[in-house]
Amino acid sequence: MWAWNGSHWVAVDRSQAPERWAAEVYRGPYHSTVTQIKDGLPSSSLSCSSVVADMLDSLMAEPGHQVLELGTGTGWNAALLALRVGPGRVTSAEVDPQLAAEARGRLEAAGLDVAVHVGDGALGWAPGAPYDRLIATYAVETVPWEWVRQTRPGGRIVTPWGRLGHIALTVADDGRSASGWVQGLGTFMPSRGVDQGLELNQVRRRGGGRTEGLFPRSATALHDANLLFALRVLVPDIRVSTAGGAVAWLHDGHSSWASLTDHEDGRTTFVQGGPLRLLDELARGWAEWERAGQPSLFDFGMTRTESDQWIWSDHDGERRRWEPLRAPRRPACGSAA
């Protein structure tokens, strides 16, 4: 597996450093483990166990269901599914031939009957359709229509959306749409081949035009998961990190960045750089969420038709369609992670 040392990813070999390896892998239910690096960036991982359990719970898989998993990775999630639904009922597609072969070997060694195929997850796996349940282990911006087409009417699709949370969709009786609710938060890798953008430190080195001042809102308030999800919908290019407690970092993965810092005297100061004034966009999105009554992330849902996809909220008895405040910079289309 791979560990972040503060500046780059370093390999940790189980046979050479078993104690360090175990410390990284078993850090707890809220930590993921990177298992592959491509071009200097994580390309496959073991999701943290709390998120795995949450997504499998959202899938509502029952014994006898036919299940399609997209993004086999190590094979762990496929193994859990096979133990739930039974032998010969899980199909898993993985775009990386090496990962697919390794996962197939692990599953066979564990005595589990799972069909692992090499293929682009965006296409699903048509030869085994229709499926009762479909689950993706990587994030998409737009749910591929092939996933809906390959799931039975009344079937369930669980997928991470936008690298921030996962959504459970139920296919309509006529098969012409799928709709459902946000189930929880979590950070996920995007489809393989999608431009993940630059890291914060890289963006800061590129973003000039530095300005400083006071900001009328608290950095600490950005810990609110409900606000973060609304901002993800309204200003999708902005990535927010609140790991620093009273400090929040924002960047767009390209050339603009900002930081907010809360002080003991009640002030919040900002520093920002780059061509976009991200704090202005953040403030607009924040105000829009407040005007809508501050819906929680569980008030949000998604509808997918063959020609369209939209996010909505159902708050205080009023259903509302949400749109970005400006057109996001769309990444290139990619394959399954």
Image (cartoon, grey):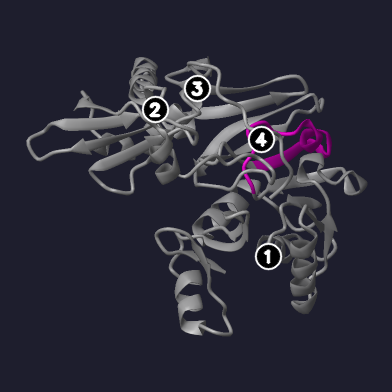
Does residue 132 appear left or right of residue 271 in this picture?
Answer: right
The tag earlier along the polypeptide, 4 or 1, is 1
Would you call the spot at circle 1 few (<14 residues within 10 Å), some (14-19), or many (20 or more)? many
Dot 3 corresponds to which residue? 314
Q: Nearer the viewer, mark 2 or mark 1?
A: 2
Residue at (66% x, 65% y) in the render: 76
Instruction: Give, as a three-letter code, the residue at label 4.
Output: Leu
Up-down relation of residue 186 to residue 221 (above or below): below
Identify the secondary structure beneath mark 2.
loop
Q: Secondary structure at mark 3?
A: strand
Residues in magenta, as a range = 138-158
Quarter where residue 52 is shown: bottom right
Question: What residue would you read off at disc 1?
Answer: 74
Q: Position of residue 68 (x, y in %)?
A: 78, 50
Query: How far is disc 3 from disc 1 in space, using C-alphas?
Result: 37 Å
Q: Which residue is mark 4?
A: 169
User: Which three-letter amino acid code belongs to the residue tagged 3?
Assistant: Asp
Q: N-terminal of the two: label 2 or label 3? A: 2
- Specify the quadrant of the image occupied by residue 264: top left
- Cα distance in 3D space between marks 3 and 4: 15 Å
Residue 274 marker? 2
Kind of residue indicated by mark 2: Gly
